Amino acid sequence: MGEKKYYLTATGFQRKKEEYQRLMELRKEKKLKIKELRDELWRPEDLNPDYGALQTDLDFIEEKIKRLENILKNSKIIRKKRKPPKKVTLGTTVRIEINGEIDEFTIVETLEADPANKKISTSSPIGKALLGKEEGETITIKTPIVNHRCKILKIKYQ
């Protein structure tokens, strides 16, 4: 069975690479501090509470690094297409009218979702409702609390 593919924008991929680099530096710092504590004490885990905390931090960082390595290794960057898209797909920016207001969202995978910056996941209620739809369509966005009517005004790549 193959590895999961992660579809990211070029910006999202770059952010994951930068996060990976920061974690690698942090791992290096934590390992150095642990080594310093080991050099000072015969049994650091018994005599120094900082040792246990550092080791816990290091374990957490190692897990994040493994996860990011998997993401970076299995990522596919969403490329801009030559022709404007006719339907909402991963990587498109969609201008909609919802509840009398105009809003714009970029459709991304969950890994890159950031609703505060108008990047919505394909698995969110809005993302699910918009995928595969065309300009001019009016759709219903179903949420646990309320259903919204929404018209797709424009589909574009950034």
Image (spheres, grey):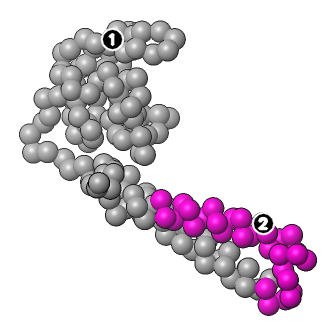
Please determine whether, in this image, residue 150 is positioned above or below residue 87: above
Residue 20 marker: none
Residue sitting at x 61%, y 78%: 28
Q: Earlier in the sequence, mark 1 or mark 2?
A: 2
Amino acid type shown at disc 1: Thr
Q: Which residues are magenta?
A: 38-67
Q: Give the percent coordinates (x, y) of residue 125.
A: 40, 23
Residue sitting at x 86%, y 87%: 41
Closer to the observer: label 1 or label 2? 2
Magenta: main secondary structure equals helix
Furthest residue in direction right, as rendered: 47
> Which secondary structure, mark 2?
helix
Residue sitting at x 33%, y 26%: 128
> Which secondary structure, mark 1?
strand
- Rounded to the nearest whole Å, what is the CA distance between mark 1 and mark 2? 49 Å
Furthest residue in direction left, as rendered: 83
Furthest residue in direction bottom, as rendered: 39
Residue sitting at x 72%, y 70%: 55
Residue 53 marker: 2
Amino acid type shown at disc 2: Ala
Asked if one can make out residue 14 in the rendered structure from this viewpoint, the answer is no
Asked if one can make out residue 92 in the rendered structure from this viewpoint, the answer is yes
Please determine whether, in this image, residue 135 is positioned above or below residue 13: above
| Crowd around label 2: few <14 · some 14–19 · many ≥20 (10 Å) | few
Asked if residue 52 lies in the magenta stretch, the reply is yes
Which quarter shows the C terminus?
A: top left
Residue ID for mark 1: 140
Q: Give the percent coordinates (x, y) of residue 146.
A: 47, 9
